[in-house]
Image: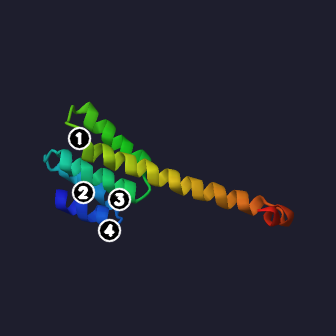
Amino acid sequence: YTSLIDACAKGGQWKRALELLDEMRKEGIPPNTVTYGAAITACGNGGQWGRALELLHQMREKKMPLNIVIYNAAIVAIARASRENMKELVREDHAKQTPHDADAN
């Protein structure tokens, strides 16, 4: 399952990655730290920073070991979302500028 979730992360298929994680649990296979890391990365790659943080929270609740790879995956997820939000704000600001404002820049 971990390899499949990792492949989903690399392919931008965050929904499928989370489906596989749920499937694992239903089959009675507990996800390990590497599995969660791959799922967090999948969510981050898909712009789903909130879901990435939910997975991090689940790991804490289960008292699973958190390592630099896990924290890095979560940080990257947040950074990507922040970058996309900033791009959107710049686009909106640019669209609101009058022609005179645009000439001043």
Q: CA distance from mark 3 to mark 1?
A: 21 Å
Circle nearer the N terminus (1, 2): 2
Picture layout, residue 90 above or below residue 68? below
Q: Residue at x 22, y 33 (%)?
A: 62
Q: Residue at x 20, y 51 (%)?
A: 35
At label 3, counting other C-alpha atoms closer than 10 Å, the crowd grade (few under 14, some 14-19, many 20 or more) is many
Residue depth check, mark 1 versus mark 2: number of the one nearer the observer: 1
Residue depth check, mark 2 versus mark 3: number of the one nearer the observer: 3
Q: Amino acid at mark 3?
A: Trp
Q: Residue at x 19, y 36 (%)?
A: 65
Task: Residue 70: name its quadrant.
Answer: top left
Picture layout, residue 17 above or below residue 54? below
Report the side of 66 relative to 90 (left or right): left
Q: CA distance from mark 2 to mark 4?
A: 14 Å
Helix, strand or loop for disc 4? loop
At label 1, counting other C-alpha atoms closer than 10 Å, the crowd grade (few under 14, some 14-19, many 20 or more) is few
Report the side of 61 relative to 95 (left or right): left
Q: Residue at x 24, y 59 (%)?
A: 5
Q: CA distance from mark 1 to mark 2?
A: 22 Å
Circle nearer the N terminus (4, 1): 4
Give me the disc on residue 11.
Answer: 4
Q: Which residue is mark 1?
A: 67
Q: CA distance from mark 4 to mark 3?
A: 8 Å
Observer-nearest residue: 32 or 79? 79
Helix, strand or loop for disc 2? helix
